[in-house]
Amino acid sequence: GYRSRAAYKLLEIQEKDRILRPGLRVVDLGAAPGSWSQIAARLVGRGGRVVALDLLPMTPLPGVVLLQGDVREPAVLEELVTQLDGAPLDLLLSDMAPNITGLSAVDQPRSIHLVEIALELVRERLQPGGVFVVKAFQGEGFDQMLADIRQSFQRVVTRKPKSSRPQSRELYLVAKGFHP
Ligand code: SAM
């Protein structure tokens, strides 16, 4: 079984966009409790690599390197890069979401900031042609952030998985064809 219902969102994206395949090097940001990493490890197989990061501790997962820390801290990102042995990434997944306060003036900038940090990692470490899948929340700052992502990728689509609550502003951006 999967550790979280979030699994079904990634499976829907995988069905449409075919982002995971054998041999890929993948980073999973905001990975706890671990269902996306479970799927990623299975689909990249032994020839691939999955490094998972979260603020929260995670129970060990076969085939996945686990890191605990805050992606907003440069030392944590450095550790992540070290775990990749300096090799570029094929796919960056981010299902990160801030702790929701209910105040959109607080939550929205925090969520955009998490996307921006993931995008920085993309620009530093993603292989040309690579893929970026990121959770985002529609609202203030969204259009600007989307335009920013479009600048670095050949095509970007938005996905609202059926398993994502319809009333939530959450959606996923699937960006393919990274060009540094
Ligand atoms: N994709 C996961 C799965 O399939 O199990 C579920 C991810 S959950 C929706 C979002 C996660 O983002 C939480 O576990 C949270 O701790 C993590 N997160 C939020 N802010 C973070 C940060 N600054 N650094 C690292 N992880 C963060």
Image: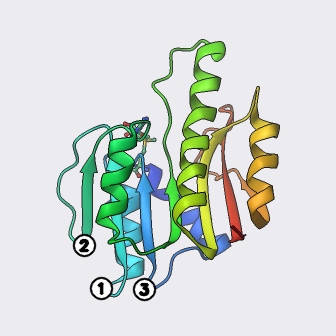
The amino acid at mark 3 is Gly
Mark 2 CB in 8 Å range of ligand 1?
no
- Considering the numbered disc 2 on the image, is that residue within a helix, a strand or a loop? loop
**Residue at image x 33%, y 43%?**
75
Residue 175 versus residue 33: which sits nearer the camera?
Answer: 175
Coordinates of residue 23 in the picture (x, y in percent)? 42, 86
- Considering the numbered disc 1 on the image, is that residue within a helix, a strand or a loop? loop
Q: Are marks 3 and 2 in contact (CB under 8 Å)?
A: no
The numbered disc on residue 149 is none
Mark 3 CB in 8 Å range of ligand 1?
no
Disc 2: CA contacts within 10 A as few (<14), some (14-19) or many (>=20): some
Look at mark 2 in the image and give the residue it sits on. 63
Q: Are marks 1 and 2 in contact (CB under 8 Å)?
A: yes
Look at mark 3 in the image and give the residue it sits on. 23
**Residue at image x 25%, y 56%?**
66
Q: Are marks 3 and 1 in contact (CB under 8 Å)?
A: no
Whole-number angstrom distance, CA of label 3 to CA of label 1: 7 Å
Q: Earlier in the sequence, mark 1 or mark 2?
A: 1
Could you say which quadrant of the image residue 133 lies in? bottom right
Whole-number angstrom distance, CA of label 3 to CA of label 2: 12 Å
Q: Earlier in the sequence, mark 3 or mark 2?
A: 3
Coordinates of residue 105 in the picture (x, y in percent)? 66, 14
Coordinates of residue 74 in the picture (x, y in percent)? 40, 41
Look at mark 1 in the image and give the residue it sits on. 46
The amino acid at mark 2 is Gly
Quadrant of the frame with the N terminus: bottom left
**Residue at image x 41%, y 45%?**
30
Q: Earlier in the sequence, mark 3 or mark 1?
A: 3
Is residue 132 rendered to the left or right of residue 98? right
Image quadrant, ligand 1? top left
**Residue at image x 35%, y 75%?**
49
